[in-house]
Image (tube, rainbow, N blue to C red):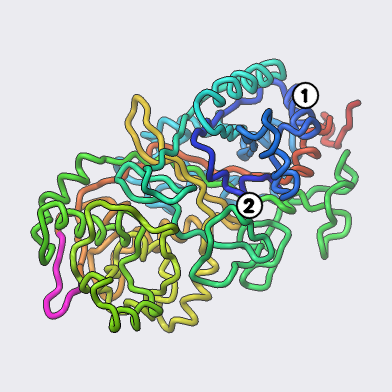
Amino acid sequence: MQGLLLHGYRHMGELTLLFLRIDDADGCRQWLRELTSDGTLTPADRMEFQLRQQDSTRGQTRVNLALSHAGLMALGMPEDVRATFPRELREGMALRAREYLRDVDENDPDRWMLGGTRHEDALQILMLLYATDAANMEPLLREHLERAHRNGLREVFIQRGQRRAREEDPPGYFRDHFGFLDGVSQPRLEGLDDPATHPRDYDRPVKRGEFLLGHANEYGEWPLSPHVPEHLPGASALPPVPGLPGRRDLGHNGTFLVLRKLEQDVPAFERFLDEQAALAPEGTPEERREWVAAKLVGRKRDGAPLATPRRHRLLRRLLPFLFQKDGAPARASGTGPAHPDNDFRYARDDPHGYGCPITAHTRRCNPRDALPPSPRVSSDVTRRHRLLRRGFNYEDAEGKGLLFIALNAHVGRQFELVQRSWVHFEQLGGIEGAEDPLAGDGGGRLIIPADPIRQCATSLRKFVTTRGGGYFFLPSLKALSFLGMQERVGDDGSDVARS
């Protein structure tokens, strides 16, 4: 598999998304053969990954590659093979955005500058270039632009991203433009733990098939995976498809990549904190603002949870001075923990939402054990909708925000369901008109449970606006090697190999 899926490149501070269009399919296949044969693309193999880190010429950069459905078409993939890809990839994000992602009004794909109804077909190949710093990124980008041009590809869009950590933050994390530590809660893959990733999750490892094609998922099933006839050149290197004689699994050890360019309105967010600071029960003006910010998001800005883990309750009784009182303001500043605490559950540790409100952003996106009808069922359901997130910040002439990158084996069941049914659900926990307070469309309200009287933050602003995105296939290295074979469709519809 490609390294992005397992490792995440948490120590890389620079990202360039290089979007390419295929003008010469034969040249593109030659280019793919070069990339897969000369070791340019970063694998997930632990031993090779460690060797790259020790190699001064390669330790400062990483490279991965994904293709859209339009890219597969331009590459000459036969229609019967493209039909085996999931509907989400074939239709594309722009076509599905209004109905399945609720991208309307300002978020409408007609307005996007990256992809969208006007540009999606031009985003055929996505190169993900990573570097430790800008000095290493510039030669890496030049190299790959030159190689692409030599092989009949041209750039249609270049998007830069950055990760900037604060001195007091734990290594491997970064803050978004709202000031919150990003990527705190990440699932572990069963049997594929990487020592460089987050130290622990609140739950058991998730079945590989939630993120990797060709493996069993949380339903005990193998996710639908694209496949090819075994007679095609290079197909013999791919694993067979169980139950489908004569077919080879093109998706095995690959996944699907979701990209969203999300602009963050930082001034509006900070003004809202000023306006609503009076909701906090006590504290200085800055502490009151931080209390509101934490309630909107569901964590403090340094990543600390608002739900108190059960293991802390005895310490709270014995050593109360170590803890803030329930409902007390979050600290405005100060050093964060060595690793943000992620070992908590909502139904068990905060059933009424006195710590983390039921409709807060993080509780919506990952409800853990808090969905009806029971904590056990909720945990099972939540595991089937987890996402591997690989995001970066961006700041350009259009604004600043988050490059949301997520990996999942089933775009509809994972990313789209979370976006449509959890982020934009307006009736949650018996509360009406309470959409996601951070990523929603604005105008709603945030209910903040408290004893004896709950609080309510009204007239939420629109803090996040979608500016672009797309769906991509992130193949395994074997699958990329197959795609680089000199194969095309003949005029009579037959598959033809060219030497």
Which residue in the protein does label 1 denote?
26
Q: Is residue 52 visible?
A: yes
Which residues are drawn in magenta?
Answer: 449-457
Q: For this rendering, which residue is in front, 487 or 151? A: 151
Q: Amino acid at mark 1?
A: Asp
Q: Which SS class for mark 2? A: helix
Q: For this rendering, which residue is in front, 67 or 386? A: 386
Instruction: Give residue 6's mark.
Output: 2
Q: Is 235 situated above or below 339?
A: above
Q: For this rendering, which residue is in front, 274 or 12? A: 12
As for residue 456 lying within the magenta part, the answer is: yes
Q: Measure how far apart labels 1 and 2 are at the Cα level.
A: 31 Å
- Image position of 94 (left or right of 256): left
Residue ID at (68%, 59%): 224
Q: Amino acid at mark 2?
A: Leu
Question: Furthest residue to the left?
Answer: 278
Instruction: Give residue 330's mark.
Output: none
In the rendered image, residue 445, in percent from the top left (x then y), is placed at 19, 61
- Image position of 188 (left or right of 32): left
Q: Nearer the viewer, mark 1 or mark 2?
A: 2
Q: Residues within 10 Å of mark 2 (few under 14, many from 20)?
A: many
Q: Main secondary structure of the magenta part?
A: loop
In the rendered image, residue 250, in percent from the top left (x then y), is placed at 76, 49
In the rendered image, residue 379, in percent from the top left (x then y), is placed at 49, 75
Q: Is 258 situated above or below 412?
A: above
Residue ID at (41%, 42%): 165
Q: Residues within 10 Å of mark 1 (few under 14, many from 20)?
A: many
